[in-house]
Amino acid sequence: MRRYSVFAIAREAMRYHEGWERAWPAPTPKPRYDVIVVGAGGHGLATAYYLGKNFGITNVAVIEKGWLGGGNTGRNTTIIRSNYLQDPSSAIYEKARSLYEGLSRDLNYNVMFSPRGLLMLAQTEHEVRGYKRTVNANDLQGIETRWIGPQEVKDLVPMINLHGPRYPVLGALLQERGGTARHDAVAWGYARGCAAMGMHILQNCEVTAIRSENGQVSEVETTRGTIGCKKLAIVVAGHSSVMAEKAGFRLPVESMALQALVSEPIKPMIDVVVMANTVHGYLSQSDKGELVIGGGTDGFVNYSQRGSWQHVEETIRALIETFPPISRLRMLRQWGGIVDMTGDRSPILSKTPVGNIFINCGWGTGGFKAIPGSGWAMAELVANGEPGPLAADFGLERFREGRFIDESVAAGVAH
Amino acid sequence: MLRLTCPHCGVTAEETELTPGGEAHLRRAGPDATDAEFESYLFARKNPKGVVFERWRHAHGCGKWFIAARHSVSWQVFGTYPAQTTEPPADLIETIRAAIPTWEGWQ
Ligand SMILES: Cc1cc2nc3c(=O)[nH]c(=O)nc-3n(C[C@H](O)[C@H](O)[C@H](O)COP(=O)(O)OP(=O)(O)OC[C@H]3O[C@@H](n4cnc5c(N)ncnc54)[C@H](O)[C@@H]3O)c2cc1C
Ligand SMILES: [Zn+2]
């Protein structure tokens, strides 16, 4: 696969751009692979990529029922941060964030990582205390965050209204190396990286059954035929329970809709990411000039990729008090994704009751930021059959043993 | 927006008037249950892509709990019934069977 570079652009400019290759081929499925990854979202593709890169396992297929990146990876608001409270969370999210820093170079693909700075607003006394605690925790974890007062918030976000009658801005938790990246590019970059190592990305191929022999996975049935495998990694986010059922076990997961929306494009008005968790809204501006806005999940099981209208209204209503200029904007598009929610709002990277089936799910409303770290940890789990240090605390057994990694109280909102 | 009819007071309520309460008909594991049974009661969820039985509370209305049988993709509502029961009514099961012959049942 030819590398992208300034010379490649110059070369192609001279010949009417006729020499670009496909970023990844569309192969015919082989009868058997060493590893099958189900789900070509960011997490599945990153798992495959690091299986090849870190463990030399390249006889791998990533199987996708739709188009790659068409799930939550292509539907999220792209917030990247690692300012979590619990140590296991901080470790895996910071691994991911630090990999994002060098990802464009590593993948030879511009993922447009933009560490523009991320603020989590404190709008109640409770939040002030909570975020100060997080800053202290992050200090111990070696993650750079700091507490800033209202005036510094105003300097960073001039359009903000500090003195909202209901929710004044009392300060913020700032992570300067948090930010955003281009979601599609992350999926495409990993896909291209996988294809370059000879892996197969099989799109429009749905896994419809999982078969095992003597308690070990043996093959999957797909809409493009039966495919054998030695190991199977299930990385399907909102459809995790559906796949688990096919493999014969249940998960502590519920699938719910999470929505986002973008405004009409306008001139630059905010160059950081702001999360306002008390009012359940968050905001950043894309390179095209659209305000990218997200809110909370619906409260019930839903597989329709459509959410409820009142959530859109609630999100906007809440944000308008703190960001008054938004009230003048027209909203262009709104969409939903089906997110996989666990009780402690932490992900699952785990062995399963079936031998050589591994599962990575439960990232819920906040897994885009985790893609590189999750893929890294999942590759280790699949390759060695046992979790490494990053994944060790995220096993399914934590529910039985009561070892929750409780981030629901720490963040309290979708992100 | 989802609309459900409260079987207690008869009001057809919009989602904003209701509070969702999660999977219905979970059976609490007894005192001599195994760890696995208790774990399953507390955490394992069916989370079906298809027919869901789910608890709702008519929070901004009569305040009572009920159960809705609903499709998690089409949002079709098959029926609602009071929560003071351990299994769905037989006629509702018939209605769902008629609508979805391949349905594997509520358990
Ligand atoms: C509106 C919204 C906003 C969000 N905002 C943020 C944010 O700001 N920051 C953040 O960090 N996270 C955010 N998230 C969460 C983030 O998007 C997800 O956690 C992450 O993208 C999950 O990636 P994934 O690869 O696990 O899943 P997906 O990208 O959903 O990929 C799973 C893939 O599996 C495929 N699949 C399913 N079943 C099968 C089958 N049977 N056979 C084959 N393939 C199958 C699906 O088609 C899909 O492509 C947001 C999510 C949403 C919906
Ligand atoms: Zn009622």
Image (cartoon, rainbow, N blue to C red):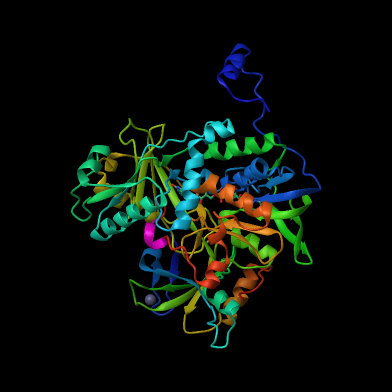
Q: Which residue is at the front of the view, A405 or A261?
A: A405
* Residue A32 visible, this orientation: yes
How far across and how far down the image is residue A98, in percent?
Answer: 48, 41
How far across and how far down the image is residue B64, in percent?
Answer: 38, 79
How far across and how far down the image is residue A302, in percent?
Answer: 52, 60
Q: Is residue A68 magenta?
A: no
Left or right: A200 in relation to A278: right
Left or right: A339 in relation to A145: right
The residue depicted at 54 percent of the width and 88 percent of the height is B31
Q: How many marks?
A: 0
Q: In the rendered view of the protein, which quadrant contains the N terminus of chain B?
A: bottom left
Q: In the image, which residues are magenta?
A: A408-413
The residue depicted at 21 percent of the width and 52 percent of the height is A168
Question: In which quadrant of the rendered view does residue A284 lie?
Answer: top left
Q: Which residue is at the front of the view, A5 or A324?
A: A5
How far across and how far down the image is residue A346, in percent?
Answer: 48, 59
